[in-house]
Image (cartoon, helix red, strand yellow):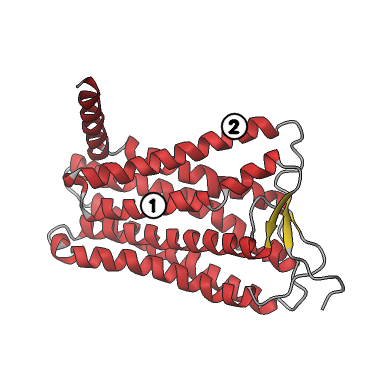
């Protein structure tokens, strides 16, 4: 036990080294947040409204867009508060809830992306069997399993975390309640939680990445054996968006979390967290629509309907 009185709240430092830039950053991040909500919400609306897009690939994309909306919502509102309030306070239960939501949704995202790579593997490598394998029931089971596994992995760790007493330094040098800074404030032995966190990280991140890489090795092998160059290019174009998102997400997260939780550089963590929690959810809708003719066609159709309705 460390000396010190029990604390009831945490103080989020945010970015204390950007004096004078609070207002511009508030405006930029607020606009990014709005664009993220609109972009991912538009994908949900288009896929829901267009019958031709109601196929497994877009069903999983709906799950990803829905997840991204809530993933950013768990972090950005409190981040915006750090720019306008001199002392950003968050109660301990609220902090633990934010940490749980953030890591639950983040973990689920890895599983959703892995399922999407499996779907592309079946579509390209097993095209004749794809309709009979990737049925509506299997799609639902895979999506539901991703959410349940993400919840279970994080919830088991949170059960231990909420039992810890907190005392001493209550300042979190971050813009959201990351687990590492929370553990620093605990006045009890946290070695078990750190070990479980490391094991979960190794299981989820490298594990899901390995499965995704195996899927893409088979996909690439199949594309290279395709006699028609046009056919191979078309097959790979359906995977390019997903591969881009996977590269952005895994690159940032592998750098940040496969290190000791409580001894990593807070400045580096914050910079990488901006990419992971703010920029990636913003880019996802654009990445999936720029190269996707079906989504762009559905979007034009929706815009034309809205224009016609407005003229009436």
Where 127 falls versus 309 (above or below)?
Answer: below
Q: Which mark is residue 66?
A: 1
Number of numbered discs visible in the structure rendering: 2
Mark 1 touches mark 2? (CB < 8 Å): no
- Mark 2, secondary structure of its residue: helix
Q: Is residue 47 left or right of residue 170?
A: left
Residue occupying image coordinates x 59% and y 62%: 99
Question: In this view, which residue lies farthest toward the right?
Answer: 3
Q: Taking the image as drawn, is residue 134 in sight?
A: no
Q: Which mark is residue 309?
A: none
Residue occupying image coordinates x 44% and y 50%: 68
Residue occupying image coordinates x 50% and y 64%: 104
Where 206 falls versus 295 (above or below)?
Answer: below
Q: Which mark is residue 27?
A: 2
The location of residue 19, given as percent across then percent down, is 77, 35
Question: In this view, which residue lies farthest toward the top?
Answer: 311
The location of residue 304, given as percent across then percent down, is 22, 27
């Amino acid at each position: 036990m460390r000396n010190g009185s029990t604390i009831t709240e945490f103080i989020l430092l945010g970015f204390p080294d950007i004096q004078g830039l609070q207002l511009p950053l508030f405006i930029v991040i607020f606009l990014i947040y709005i664009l993220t909500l609109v972009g991912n919400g538009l994908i949900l609306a288009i896929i829901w409204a267009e019958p031709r897009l109601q196929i497994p690939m877009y069903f999983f994309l709906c799950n990803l867009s829905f997840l991204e909306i809530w993933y950013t919502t768990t972090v950005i509102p409190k981040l915006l508060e750090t720019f306008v309030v001199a002392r950003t306070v968050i109660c301990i239960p609220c902090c633990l809830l934010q940490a749980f939501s953030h890591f639950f949704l983040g973990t689920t995202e890895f599983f959703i992306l892995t399922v999407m790579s499996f779907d592309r593997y079946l579509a390209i490598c097993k095209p004749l069997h794809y309709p009979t394998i990737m049925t509506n029931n299997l799609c639902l089971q895979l999506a539901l399993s991703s959410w349940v596994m993400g919840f279970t992995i994080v919830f088991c760790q949170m059960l231990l975390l909420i039992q810890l007493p907190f005392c001493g330094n209550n300042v979190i040098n971050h813009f959201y309640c990351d687990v590492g800074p929370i553990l620093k404030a605990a006045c009890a032995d946290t070695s078990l939680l750190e070990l479980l966190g490391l094991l979960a990280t190794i299981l989820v991140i490298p594990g899901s990445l390995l499965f995704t890489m195996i899927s893409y090795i088979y996909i690439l092998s199949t594309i290279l054996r395709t006699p028609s160059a046009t056919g191979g290019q078309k097959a790979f174009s359906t995977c390019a968006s997903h591969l881009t998102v996977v590269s952005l997400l895994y690159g940032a997260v592998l750098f940040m979390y496969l290190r000791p939780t409580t001894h990593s550089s807070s400045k580096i963590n914050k910079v990488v967290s901006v990419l992971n929690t703010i920029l990636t959810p913003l880019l996802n809708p654009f990445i999936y629509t720029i190269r996707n003719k079906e989504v762009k066609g559905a979007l034009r159709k929706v815009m034309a309907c809205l224009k016609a309705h407005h003229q009436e």
